[in-house]
Image (cartoon, rainbow, N blue to C red):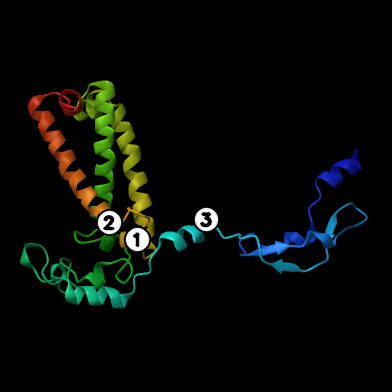
Amino acid sequence: MAATILASTAVPAGLRSVPLASCSSRADISNLRYTSFGTPRYTGKVRRGSIRCEGIRESVDKATKKEITKEEILQNQETNQSEKQSVFGAVPTSGSFYPRPEVERRPETGEKSLGSLFAFDGAAPETINGRLAMVGIVWAAIAEKMSGLTVFDQLYTQGTGLVYYVALVPLIAYASIVPMLNGESTDARQSGPFTAKAERWNGRLAMIGFLSLLLTENFIHAPVFTNFF
C-alpha cells in the first residue's frame, strides 16, 4: 500500500528545476530512471522544440500590445493640429497644470502619479467615465426592460442598483488605472475592431446618451427603454 502511494505521487526530480515559464521546451522522458525510493530522476538533457510554455500575459501582450515610443509622440505633437491648439484655443504649455503637451500627459512618457493621470487632460478621467457610461447605458436598457423602473428609481428608490454601482465604479477605475501606472495608455492596445479610437468615441456617445437618458426620464417620469423600445 505504501509503495503504491509513493509511486502514484512521485515527481521527476529533474523536472522540478525546469521553469514552466520557459518557452519552446520539451523534456525527453525516455531517460528517466527510478531511485530506490520509487522516485524517478531525470538524467537526460532537455531538448528544445515542441511545447510552448509562454505565460498568459506574454501571449496577450504579443497579440495586442503596440509599443509607443517618445519619438512617435513628439512627431504627432508637431503634426497634429489638435495637439497644437487645445480646448478653448489654449496652447499647451510645458510644465503647466492644463493644457499640457502630449509628451507630458501621456503615461508612456509623462509623470505617472495619480495627480497627473487624473488631471483634466490626463489619461484616466475620460477613459474611466467612458467605460462606466458604456456599462451604464447597457445596464439601464436591460434593467428597465426587466423591472419597468427608471434609472433614478433603480438607484435610489429600490436601492439594488446603487449597490451594484458602488461596487462597479472602483473595479473599473482600478482596472483602468493599473496599466497607466505601468506606463501604458489605451492607444497601446488593439485587438481586432477594439481600438482606442473606437473606445473613445463609444465612450463619449455613451456619456452623452446616459446623461440624456437621466434628463429625459426626469421630465417624463417613466423609463425610456420600456415605453419607447
Residue 206 percent coordinates (x, y)? 21, 44
Q: Amino acid at mark 1?
A: Met
Whether tag 1 and tag 2 are in contact, CB under 8 A, the answer is yes
Residue 23 percent coordinates (x, y)? 61, 64
Mark 1 Cα-neighbour bin, 10 Å: few <14, some 14–19, many ≥20: many
- The residue pinned by badge 1 equals 180
Instruction: Establish if 115 lies above or below 219.
Output: below
Give the spatial CA distance, label 1 vs label 3: 20 Å
Answer yes or no: is residue 11 visible: yes
Q: Earlier in the sequence, mark 1 or mark 3?
A: 3
- The residue pinned by badge 3 equals 56
Question: Of discs 2 and 3, which sits in the foreground?
Answer: 3
What residue do we see at 25% from left, 76% from top? 74
Whether tag 1 and tag 3 are in contact, CB under 8 A, the answer is no
Q: Secondary structure at mark 1?
A: helix
Question: Of discs 1 and 3, which sits in the foreground?
Answer: 3
Q: Going by the image, does 100 lie left or right of 196?
A: left
Mark 2 Cα-neighbour bin, 10 Å: few <14, some 14–19, many ≥20: many
Residue 207 percent coordinates (x, y)? 19, 45
Q: Nearer the viewer, residue 123 or 52?
A: 52
Give the spatial CA distance, label 1 vs label 2: 8 Å
| Residue lying farthest to the top in this orientation | 148
Q: Earlier in the sequence, mark 1 or mark 2?
A: 2
Q: Secondary structure at mark 3?
A: helix
Q: Nearer the viewer, residue 95 or 212?
A: 212
What is the quadrant of the C terminus in the image? top left
Q: Secondary structure at mark 2?
A: helix
Q: Nearer the viewer, residue 115 or 227?
A: 227
What residue do we see at 79% from left, 56% from top? 12
Answer yes or no: is residue 94 visible: no
What residue do we see at 26% from left, 43% from top? 134
